[in-house]
Amino acid sequence: MSTFSTLGLPEALVRAAHECGYDTPTPIQAQAIPVVLAGGDVLAAAQTGTGKTAAFLMPILARLMASPKPSGGPIRVLILTPTRELAAQIEASFRDYARYTKQTALVIFGGVSINPQISQLRRGVDVLIATPGRLLDLAGQRAVNLSNIETFVLDEADRMLDMGFIRDIRRVLALLPAKRQNLLFSATFPTEITSLADQLLNQPVRVEVARSGASPVLISQRVCVLDKTRKREALVQLIKEGGWFQVLVFVRTKHGANRLAEQLEKSAISALAIHGNKSQNARTRALAEFKDGKLQVLVATDIAARGIDISELPHVVNFELPHVPEDYVHRIGRTGRAGSEGEAHALVSPEELSQLAAIERLLGKRIERFTMPGFDKPSPHEADHVPERRQMAPREQQGQRRPRSPGSRTQANGNTQRAGASPRGAPTRSR
Ligand code: AMP
């Protein structure tokens, strides 16, 4: 079995990994690290929770360390990611992994003042972590020079596509030098991503830890079929009788999110809705309360939930099923992460059975049904429904992970500088 040393990482990074509580590389790390170290392009099918961030950051750091440049030089690595939350998480991981190196990173995203970011960029940085919109703004103002990029990482490419960033990505690509290393990470591979990968990557090594349809193995999934008018009552009962806390509930619309949060409050369950119409401030506050355990339920739409990183989240509820089956996999991926167990429940009305069938086809298995006395209403077609089988990821692929203690990601290293920081900590410069 490989270790971080046998994968070829220098001692400074091996030590940092161990201090993060990582004993063994995850499958994606074991596969990707040697390829990235050797300078090759990578096409990785991996969702959040697989350890993909370290799979690219660690070998990138190793390469930077192997050919040091004077500080204040050009940006050498660009990491493009869809949301500010993800950008901030990558930067936090960078701080963890780079603590015994001299490499620096800067995170830039929109919604905060641009001027501190401009002065930070002037001082020079090795690794730039950015969301596409703000990066292009800065490029338009000639505040960022990407012509010396050695490695380009496109993280969560399918999310970028969902959020309408594909044109922005192409604009960013036009600013990069032709000769560079490219790493593309995506949980799913719709046609647009495959064609982007064909243009972007040069003889990539394919790395796959879980098929796009495979659900993480430590999540127990259950479905209750019931009338849609009874879902709210059923949810209240599940939460109260199960004594659930930190419940992430998915709905389809912003309006539905607001309404459900209000109704839960009326049933004496503390709840807040997060969706695209809420200000960044309101979203950050809701998330902080949720993470601290002050808020029992967070009701979210798919867009708002992107980029939320809450380790060991015990409960995810699909109050309404998504129209796109892959979104179901993303939703339930919020629980049981990094080796800890989680439960995903779905409340499904007879009208949603075709969506359920599509999800089960993607998963390659039938999801276990559960009944709630007084609520359940199996449809006549339910009993006959047998999904088509698709290949599943092997069980051990996620089995060797070790959970990290909650909050350990926020341990700042002593060298971290925060410049021009808003209370939310952006922009942040790390060393
Ligand atoms: P990611 O997929 O990059 O979002 O990582 C998911 C979680 O797994 C994060 O909390 C990481 O800190 C954690 N993690 C990453 N690599 C390892 C490892 N080798 N062993 C244990 N936990 C890890």
Image (cartoon, rainbow, N blue to C red):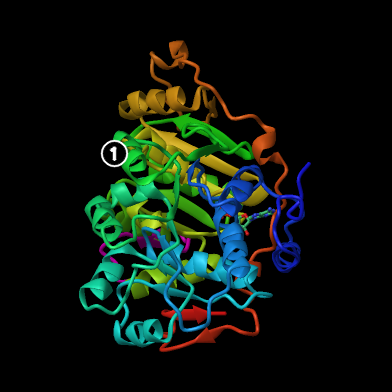
Q: Quadrant of residue 198?
A: top left
Q: Can see residue 407? A: no
Residue 204 or 211: which is nearer the viewer?
Answer: 204
The secondary structure making up most of the magenta span is loop
> What percent of the width, then of the height, locates residue 190?
34, 35
Quadrant containing the N terminus is: top right
Quadrant containing the C terminus is: bottom right
Residue 123 or 341: which is nearer the viewer?
Answer: 123
Residue 342 or 33: which is nearer the viewer?
Answer: 33
Q: Quadrant of ligand 1?
A: bottom right
Q: Can see residue 209? A: yes
Helix or strand or loop: what does disc 1 sit on?
helix
Q: Residue at x 27, y 75 (%)?
A: 138
Q: Is the CB atom of the residue marked by disc 1 within 8 angstroms of ligand 1's nearest atom?
A: no
Q: Residue at x 67, y 32 (%)?
A: 395
Q: Is 405 a magenta residue? A: no
- In the image, taking residue 80 as reference, residue 42 lies left or right, namely right
Q: Which residues are magenta?
A: 266-279
